[in-house]
Image: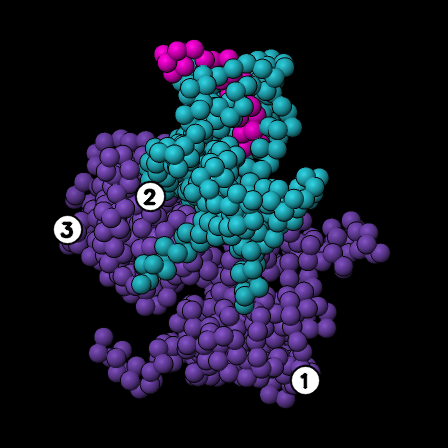
Chain colours: A cyan, B purple
Amino acid sequence: MSEWRYWFAEQKGTLLALGIFLVMFIIYTSNHPAGFTANVVQTASNKGVLLAFVAMAQTLVVITAGIDLSVGMIFLLTNCLASWLVVGGPVETTLGVIAVLLVGVLCGALNGAIVIYGRLQPIVATIATGAMYFGIALLLRPFPGGSVNEDLADALTGRLFGVIPASLVTLLATVLIIWVPFSRSVYGRAAYAAGSSEVAAYMSGVPIKRGKFLAYVLAGLLASFGGLFLTFFTYTGEAAYASGNAYTLFSIAAVVLGGVSLFGGRGSVIGAIFGAFAFRTIGDLLFVFDLDPLWQPLFQGVVLLLAVSLGAFALFRVKNRLEWFG
Amino acid sequence: MDTAPEETRPLLHMQGISKRYGGVRALEDAELVVHAGRIHAILGENGAGKSTLIKVMSGVVAPDQGRIVLDGAEVTFDSPAAANKAGVVCIFQELSLIPELSVADNIMISDPPTRFGMIDRRAQRRIAVEALARAGASDIHPSALVKDLPLSRRQMVEIAKALARKPRILILDEATSALTAADVSKVFDVLKRLRSEGLALLYISHRMHEIAELADDCTVFRNGQKIATYKAGTKSDNEVIELMIGREYQNVFPPKPAPNAAAKPILECRGLTWTDRLTDINFTVRPGEVVGLGGLDGQGQRELLLALFGVLRGCTGQIVIDGEPVRLASPAQASSGKVGMALIPEDRKTEGLMLPMTVRENLAFAAMDKVSKHGIIDRQAEDRLLDEMVKLLAIKTAGLEIPVGALSGGNQQKVVIAKWLMRHPRIILLNDPTRGIDVGTKQEIYQLLRRLADQGAAIVFYSTDYDELIGCCDRVLVLYDGAIKRELVGDEITEHALIASALNIDVAEAAKMARANA
């Protein structure tokens, strides 16, 4: 029994994010003209997966008590790159995909190297690198264009067995292949430890630098997953500055909705994924209620504020005022 | 164990260690010889070089000069991890636990068991449970988050974590200062067992009776140098303290004046109750009185101070100041001029000071209204006031523009006290203010408290150190399970009576137990 209590306390943020998402999604589908159909789910999942990947990337960095303002730009850069490279026959396409992911890894590694070995503030370092990544993206695609291997694109954005969205399956596979091993490895724990109390972690002989570096590298990789998927949906590459910035900011919103502490050391990628889907669904709610799209940003902001406040309700029950600041 | 240590090869020999921080000499040609199977106490005032010596030994700082010989071979440790690998494990005074991780994660933080490259949580948990049991702390759940544990439990986790690393040399730096009396005796049993298993233990503590009970050898440091090494029990407490402070030792505690029963109480507590942690607390404090809060750690003493200071919500009962019932809903109200309360907090690092900010900034916050007119700060008045405070408390600092974090623990605590004294409080609440502070500074704090009381302040003083309660207080309220179990006045305040009422048992029975133990 008490074991459950500890598990619940640990997963509270993730469960809350799941709850918010479910409520939003039920409201959405029950008011959708087509209802809960494979098609509606597929569209929702395809849209959500993009932000989910970027939010996962953000989570890894936030866990180390950092923040990555370049994730949106890595997402754009890899999109532009994929629109050049992920084309042609199976061999060419495969090599193209590998190259795109490798660029994501390099971007993450550069961020990590600057923050960890150069000892720069993450916020400053990633603003600068983000601008660089966008600059390269712009050189690659001064105008929207390019193409992608459409067979692969359709397979990954379609449905498996006619029901399950393939993008969702990819997302799940990413969680299993990247997140689960990372979070359970010594380095993953080093990332958490560094985020929670870097001094204590150092004194305990934890490999903080390698743990943090790995977190940044994987963040780059996950953002490039997002970039690939963007290419699969749009069949083109586009260096859209506003879109890159929006993804960066939305990823932070998704992370907070997902119960990941911005102070570091707490939260999981799973929560951030639910956070990302919940955030996307908020935007779609307006569509089913047939409201003017002009209202969307205002509405999205209000709902986000309410959702984030849910986590703060616990503070009203606090009897010792010092806990407000803990 | 009766072999004279000189005849066996030392396990660890530190030779000619020197270390400077900027212009400050922390260690000068220091020497230490440690033998397996013995508990070696290191004594010295704060700033004597003990902490630096330990940091050198455990790989936190690199010495400027000197060599470390471990088991006959010279070693250099470039990180705590390297020292751990060689079997030198330190339990630091500043906790090295990671708050957001679970107890089990923390115990196995540096070298967890893995399977297929991933941490094997089941094995980790098993080892953690064993380590907790070895440390005598089986009551701690391995899945609990460290940040949810009280200080004394965290310290036990810290000890379990050190044990799980299978050390050959275990260093305890003020490791018992946060522990309850019951835990201390458990830890002592553990340490004695480890000694019989052949470990070398280095024990740093400011509590003389702990050293008397545990140590086989003692080394005294002063001003960064080794002053003397001797077998435990061959010197009296007074001789030891003279070695430490390098001058004649006077009585630590100032004399207590005769109580003034005629004075009207400043502070009165009527039926104060808060959740299940405080039950029906009634007491009064008159000006000029030092009232101690005693009892085992965690029996509601801290909560009582916080409740008085307006930090706790949902208190029932009355707090009466100068005969008038008041409602204190925040520290700002409690410390306002009319009430005039001050709380010297337990954790000076988070509740008392802003470490990265300078001495000036830390002090000036508290006295802003005293040195400003119409919102504009009079820099000269501020300088005068701050200089006066630094002198009054003999704060050892290279200047007002030094970050508080760079001062020693004792001097940091003086800054906290100075901060509050500048507001001329009439009611001073102290939450274990001398934890981890050297003898010299403690003595200064005792004298300061008595002086403030003589000037008419009412003082409520919580301490985990019985000697302090006996030496400083006119009366002691002993708390047990959130209620006042006994009030000891004047000569009634003895170690026996304190312990007996802390454990909520009969005094006669306690005396019997003491005899049986002796």
Q: Which mark is residue B323?
A: 1
SS category of the residue bearing label 1? loop
Alpha carbons under labels 3 and 1: distance apart: 67 Å
Disc 3: which chain? B
Residue A73 sits inside the magenta stretch: yes
SS category of the residue bearing label 2? loop
Q: Can you tell which of label 3 and label 1 is closer to the viewer?
A: 1
Estimate the x, y position of residue A317 in percent, counting from the top left: 54, 66
From the image, tell me which residue sits under label 3. B3
From the image, tell me which residue sits under label 2. B109
Residue pictured at 68% horizontal, 68% vertical: B333
Kind of residue at disc 2: Ile
Q: Is residue B274 left or right of residue B5?
A: right
Q: Is residue B234 left or right of residue A257?
A: left
Say whether mark 1 and mark 3 are on the same chain.
Answer: yes
Alpha carbons under labels 3 and 2: distance apart: 37 Å
Estimate the x, y position of residue B197 in percent, counting from the top left: 17, 51
Q: Residues within 10 Å of mark 3 (few under 14, many from 20)?
A: few
